[in-house]
Amino acid sequence: MAKTTLKLPFSLLFFTSLTLTLATLALTAAETAAYPTIPGTMPTGCSLSEEEVPTPVRREVYENGQIYDITHRITSDMPSFGSKEGLGQYLWLPKSIKNGSLANNSEMKLPSHTGTHVDAPGHVFDHYFDAGYDVDTLDLGVLNGPALLVDVPRDKNITAEVMESLNIPRGVRRVIFRTLNTDRKLMFKREFDSSYVGFMKDGARWLVQNTDIKLVGIDYLSAAAHDDLLPSHYEFLEGREVILVEGLKLDGVPAGLYNIHCLHLRLLGAEGSPIRCILIK
Ligand SMILES: *[C@@H]1O[C@H](CO)[C@@H](O)[C@H](O)[C@H]1NC(C)=O
Ligand SMILES: *[C@@H]1O[C@H](CO)[C@@H](O)[C@H](O)[C@H]1NC(C)=O
Ligand SMILES: *[C@@H]1O[C@H](CO)[C@@H](O)[C@H](O)[C@H]1NC(C)=O
């Protein structure tokens, strides 16, 4: 036996609930209770155990290119807003089969704006927060429906001028903006990088005033450029109509028209939530 081989269903882990029961999966070997890396992507130096469980398949694209998963996996190595160290450990296994429990039951703790996530109006407006504008109040009609994936110029942040040059027709309600952030693979770098591309205040204002866009998707942890962090958020969220979906994974997805489906968790009282988004052709 050489290296540890963990087989954990991460995607399942994420979307069930805070406490998860995973009783049916067999295991090969494990040296710690933590979740050290992405299962199925670590070197496997040993043969399968007596139970011969096949390695789980992890995919980005389904149904021969009809469905793109544009959600980042949550991992301890992923960037976290403002942090040099990344997200860090977010999952623990206080009850495990190895410890004599009937099942493995994980617990997780993570910032609600982790990875691919959604912002509610209460994120930057205290009076909206107090009035209850949490993620449970977000409109699923906005988060689901026809959406345009567009590439923006790589040499600028998203200003009014850039927005105007994109010529997005009236009537388009959902736009995903792919930027230099995707080319730079910023969501795959542990250290937070404040030089990411986002909306400048005038770009956000232009969008709100001159388009019908209500879903704004972007490929790093904030839709607002760092230099205009609060001003751009104010422009977007003040009207309580625009929904920001941040930290999308847009690598290798052709630009064009799709149906987007985004579902976040119904976290009562939370101004942000991890969200699962897919594009369907
Ligand atoms: C077993 O339980 C102890 C505490 O009782 C804990 O520290 C340890 O991490 C657990 N081990 C596993 C593999 O879950
Ligand atoms: C269950 O917990 C053990 C540690 O006790 C771990 O090795 C195994 O991978 C866990 N299985 C699942 C499905 O989480
Ligand atoms: C976008 O703005 C950030 C500051 O918010 C800056 O560091 C970065 O260089 C700008 N990017 C481009 C492509 O102009």
Image (tube, rainbow, N blue to C red):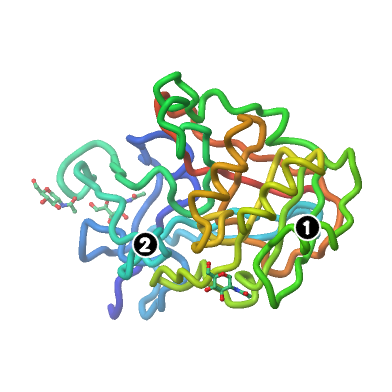
Q: Quadrant of the N terminus?
A: bottom left
Does 126 sit above or below residue 38?
Answer: above
For disc 2, the neighbor class at 10 Å (few under 14, some 14 to 19, many from 20) is few
Q: Quadrant of residue 214?
A: top right
- In the image, taking residue 178 as reference, residue 211 lies left or right, namely right
Give the percent coordinates (x, y) of residue 38: 42, 65
Specify the quadrant of the image occupied by residue 8: bottom left
Badge number at residue 163 = 1
Is 216 placed above or below 150 here?
Answer: above
Image coordinates for residue 188, horizontal then vertical, percent:
50, 70
Q: Residue at x 72, y 41 (%)?
A: 208
Residue 8 in sight from this viewpoint = yes
Give the amino acid at mark 2.
Gly
Q: Residue at x 16, y 42 (%)?
A: 100
Q: Is residue 266 left or right of residue 138?
A: left
Tell me the quarter of the picture where residue 36 sits: bottom left
Q: In the image, what residue occupies the spot 59% across and 77% down?
A: 184
Q: Are marks 1 and 2 in contact (CB under 8 Å)?
A: no
Closer to the camera in the image, 138 or 234? 234
Q: Secondary structure at mark 1?
A: helix
Total number of numbered labels?
A: 2
Residue 49 visible in image: no
Q: Is residue 280 left or right of residue 131?
A: right
Mark 2 — residue?
Answer: 82
Residue 139 placed where, x, y %?
65, 27
Question: Whole-percent x and y of residue 187?
Answer: 52, 67
Q: Residue at x 81, y 65 (%)?
A: 254
What is the distance, in whole Å, between disc 1 and disc 2 at their CAs? 27 Å
Q: Amino acid at mark 1?
A: Met
Q: Within 8 Å of ligand 3, the CB of disc 1?
A: no
Q: Nearer the viewer, residue 47 or 135?
A: 135
